[in-house]
Image: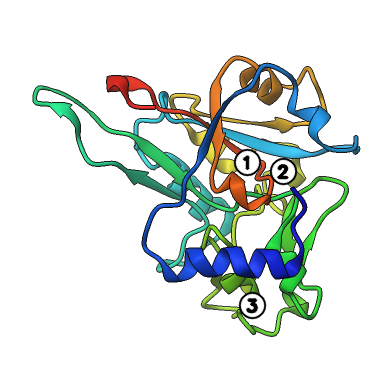
Amino acid sequence: MSCSRRNFLAGTGAVIFTTGVATTSVITARSSVASEETEKAVRYGMLHDENACIGCTACTDACREVNKVPEGVSRLEIHRSEPIGEYPDVEYRFTRESCQHCENPPCVYVCPTGAAYKDEKTGIIDVHKEKCVGCGYCLAACPYQVRFFHPEDHSADKCNFCRDTNLAQGKLPACVESCPTKALVFGDLNDPNSDINKMLSIKVIYRDKEHLGTKPKLFKAAFHKGGVV
């Protein structure tokens, strides 16, 4: 599905002004996601396993510390569902909310100054802070509503897979390193032997609002405890 700027704005309008939860499509990955796009040097993606996540928020704390994220804003949130089941057999579903690092990023398409951009060497969606004029177009266009204005430098901000911190030092993103249950897997989607591709080949996965054609690179292993998928 191709996504023009007009299509994205039309699609995101429904997301911004309605309170309903957008439908997500569940898929079973049986082949490498690397075949989805033209081969590039690196194409980073992340998998959040909802069955392994315990909602401890170690990831959010690590993200804030490593990336110096001020209080009052966040690059990463973990949301807990309503109780599933009956006491004492109760389960909770934990879902991750952060930048999806879309292959077709609406935030990039609407930015008038080129501040929002996709790094073609890594596939990471990032911000040239010195070019940001604070117009807010990218915040409005993002179907996932994960961008915010940094309260100190007043530029658009969000998760960038720790590109300037851990990743630049040859480490995994802070959230991945800190997860005690290994619920997060990060790697190169262009490498068929990467850890993330190995997990995508055996997990039942979905991507948020995939019907919009954004092609998110944040995958989620569908929660199935208690009969919920």
Q: Position of residue 92 (x, y in %)?
A: 27, 33
Labels 2 and 1 touching (C-beta < 8 A): yes
Q: Residue at x 48, y 69 (%)?
A: 16
Task: Specify the amino acid type for callout 1.
Answer: Pro
Of the residues under marks 3 and 2, which one precedes in the sequence? 3
Q: Is residue 77 visible?
A: yes
Q: CA distance from mark 3 to mark 1?
A: 27 Å
Q: Which mark is residue 167?
A: 2
Q: Secondary structure at mark 3?
A: helix
Mark on residue 173?
Answer: 1
What's under tag 2, amino acid-wise?
Answer: Leu
In the rendering, at what x and y percent does residue 74 appear? 47, 60
Element type where label 1 sits in the image:
loop
Image coords of residue 108 (percent x, y): 74, 66
Mark 1, Cα crowd under 10 Å, few <14 / some 14-19 / many 20+, is: many
Label 3, label 2: how far apart the Cα atoms are: 28 Å
Q: Is residue 84 above or below residue 96?
A: above
* Distance between mark 2 and mark 1 Cα atoms: 6 Å
SS type, badge 2:
helix
Q: How many marks?
A: 3
Amino acid type, callout 3: Tyr
Residue under label 3, please give it. 137
Please indicate whether residue 191 sits to the left or right of residue 24 in the image.
right
In front of the other: 78 or 102: 102
Report crowding for label 3: few under 14, some 14 to 19, many 20 or more residues within 10 A (C-alpha). Answer: some
Task: Give the left or right position of residue 123, taking residue 176 as reference.
Answer: right
Q: Is residue 50 above or below residue 99?
A: above
Asked where in the image residue 200 lies, by quadrant, the reply is: top right
Residue 62: percent from left, percent from top? 49, 46
Image height of 66 relative to 141, above or below = above
Res. 157 in view: no
Marker disc for residue 92: none
